[in-house]
Image: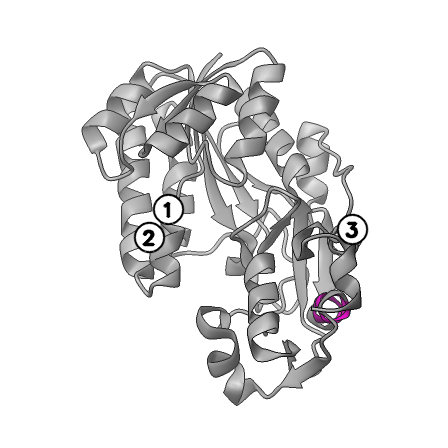
Amino acid sequence: MRVFVTGASGHIGSALVPELLEAGHKVVGLARSDKSAAALAAAGADVYRGELDDPDGLADAAAAADGVIHLAFKHEALRAGGYADAVASDLRAIETFADALAGTGKPLVGTSGTLMLAGLGRTGTEADVLGAGPRIDAENAVIALAGRGVRSSVVRLPPTVHSSLDHHGFVPTLIAIAREKGVAGYVGDGSNRWPAGHTLDVARLYRLALEDAPAGSRLHAVGDEGVPFSEIAAVIGRHLNRPAVSIPPEQAGAHFGFLGSLVALDNPTSSARTQELLGWQPIQPGLIEDLGQGHYFGGPAEASGS
């Protein structure tokens, strides 16, 4: 299968491209820079030079492919306060793919997040569907394509997709904040839970979704259903030789920056239906074990000091 992948040189994309190639697929990756293009070529993928905000280019690339995996999102805009622009760009890209793929029966795998299910008061499942909101609209747009002759599915990512390939996600951000502030923080008693998934397990799920997910499937790339935030802070603090301390809720924004509104969310999430539907099993280390390996901190030696 010839697969067009956006975000192919990013964190998850850098694991997905070899996953697809090893399974016998041909990969065409979207690249907006020379650095990204070189990384994709070195990995064995073909390169399509373009931008997420170039609808004509995206449409051409999607039409020439046998399937599309849409990973790209303007994460830099999220960090800079431009979340609305990033969300709008993502939705426009999906609409472009929709027009290019409608009626073909080709697969389109989109990307969403489990944090939209925070606040349910119970463990979230793949059957949970929300009506509207940032990124929710994009997820629902992908799912709706099942009614337009596209074998569409969405992979909901947990807030922590972790591995040695993760250099800019929430875990490195939390570690950087702990270094800057001198403490590894959590909000309140830190009992709120974040789900997690290992990058390699997540990449395998995207491949399975491309190959076999029924049209209209919502999938959860979750290995750990819910890790208490206080445990995450404790491991970070131990490796940095910093105390793990409670941050009052009213100070979360000042302490955690753009993560301030997220760090107290309780987001336990199940992947039971995903595992049953696609035969997917998380086999890589969980978040706490992965943090314990030291690669996020420059190696085990940093555990004894900063």
Residue 93 in which image quadrant: top left
- Residue under label 2, please give it: 87
Asked whether residue 212 is drawn in magenta, I would say no
Tell me the amino acid under the disc marked 2.
Answer: Val
Nearest the viewer among 304 and 103 is 304
Report helix, strand or loop for mark 2: helix
Q: Separation of disc 3 and disc 1 at Cα?
A: 36 Å
The image shows residue 208 at horizontal and vertical percentages of: 61, 26
What residue do we see at 37% from left, 20% from top?
47
Q: Earlier in the sequence, mark 2 or mark 3?
A: 2
Q: Which residues are magenta?
A: 231-238
Viewer-side label of 3, 1: 3
Q: Amino acid at mark 3?
A: Gln
Is residue 116 in sight in this rendering? yes
**Identity of the residue drawn at 78% across and 37% down:** 283
144, above or below 187, in the image = above
At 71% across and 32% down in the image, what residue appears?
A: 280
236 or 137: nearer the eye? 236
Quarter occupied by residue 100: top left
Q: Which mark is residue 293?
A: 3
- Is the magenta region chiefly helix, strand or loop? helix
Q: Residues within 10 Å of mark 3 (few under 14, many from 20)?
A: some
Which residue is found at the position 37% from the left and 54% from the top? Answer: 76
